[in-house]
Amino acid sequence: MSALPSDEVGHIKIIDLSSESALCILKSEIPEDEFNDITNATHIEPIVLSDYATELSSALQQCPLSLSVLRDTLYTNGFKRGFDSVVHSDAAFIEVATRHFLDLMSSPRNPLNQRVLERTAATFFIIFIVNQLFISNNDIIELDWLEREFFATDRTKWDGVLIKVENRSCSAGLIEFSGGCNDQTSSTKNQQDITKLYSKLMKVLDGQSSSAARQTFCMRYYNKRIHFEKLTIYKKMLFRTIHATIETPTSPRKLVEFVKEIPNMLAWKEAVIEHTVEL
């Protein structure tokens, strides 16, 4: 197979299925059945939202783009009696995340609209999102934050590590921040962090048992966006996929776009949970 182009990871011999050009060339150079096998191996199954979450998400997406109307819609359709933290964990995430960003947008000086450096921005956005995302599964995954090490990546420091509860030698994913909000972090810094992240994810894969699916996960933050990604080995080839991307919700319109993307975030999380259990 000839070299495939990739915006960010081709130089370390990873085929980037989030790159349309790489995807098209791959499809043209291998048999259709093999291409289908690769897409199946790198695929993440969609989730079915609970009725509660479906109704809440639909109501938020259909209401006018007004902070006060969004808040009224949230309280009219959410925070119901009879809530079950397991059955309705998807609705809980929608409720808490939506309330968080509505509060920031309604505040006198929304920090996510200011020039905020990396770690401060992370506390308002990615750390908050990930903590809420995994709170219903904290018996399986423990979250380590800020300048953390994971033995399989030597002495490298990480902004976040997804650790298997009661087995700190197992991790299903790494988290890397590349800058803050409106701080003009360069694309060079972003590219360096991507190379660092995926180079070390390859080492994590090398250390996984043969009984586990050969995959691992990561999250990246850059330029006010969080990317939910996966690295998969299939027939000795490495494939990167991006399963969800969310932009910092700093306006009613962006908040509604965030809500629309929540099922993809939850599907990525479920794949992480299932993989962690197998490790």
Image (cartoon, grey):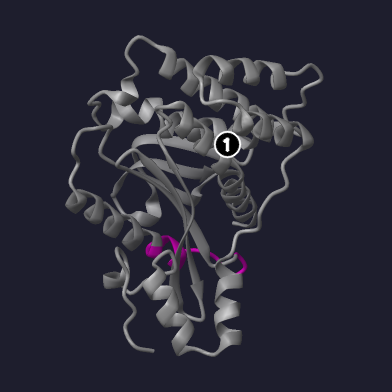
Residue 166 vertical position relative to residue 111 in the rendered view, above or below: below
Q: Please give the residue where the numbered disc 1 appears in the rendered image.
A: 134
Q: Is 82 left or right of 258, judged from the image as shown?
A: right
- For the point 61% across and 27% down, the residue is 63
The N terminus lies in quadrant: bottom left
Three-letter amino acid code of the residue under disc 1: Phe
Kind of element beneath mark 1: helix
Q: Which percent across, then down, holds residue 157?
A: 29, 44
> In the rendered image, which quarter is residue 250 located in?
top left
- For the point 51% across and 37% down, the residue is 258
Q: Which percent across, then down, holds residue 218?
A: 44, 51
Q: Is residue 203 magenta?
A: yes
Q: Which percent across, then down, holds residue 221?
A: 35, 43
The C terminus lies in quadrant: bottom right
Residue nearest the observer in this picture, 239 or 250: 250
Taking the view exactly as shown, the residue that stands out farthest to the top is: 108
Residue nearest the observer in this picture, 75 or 167: 75
Q: Is residue 173 magenta?
A: no
Residue nearest the observer in this picture, 153 or 199: 199
Residue 104 vertical position relative to residue 25 in the rendered view, above or below: above
Range of magenta residues: 202-212
Question: Does residue 136 show up?
Answer: yes
Q: Is 240 left or right of 181, judged from the image as shown?
A: right
- For the point 73% across and 47% down, the residue is 48
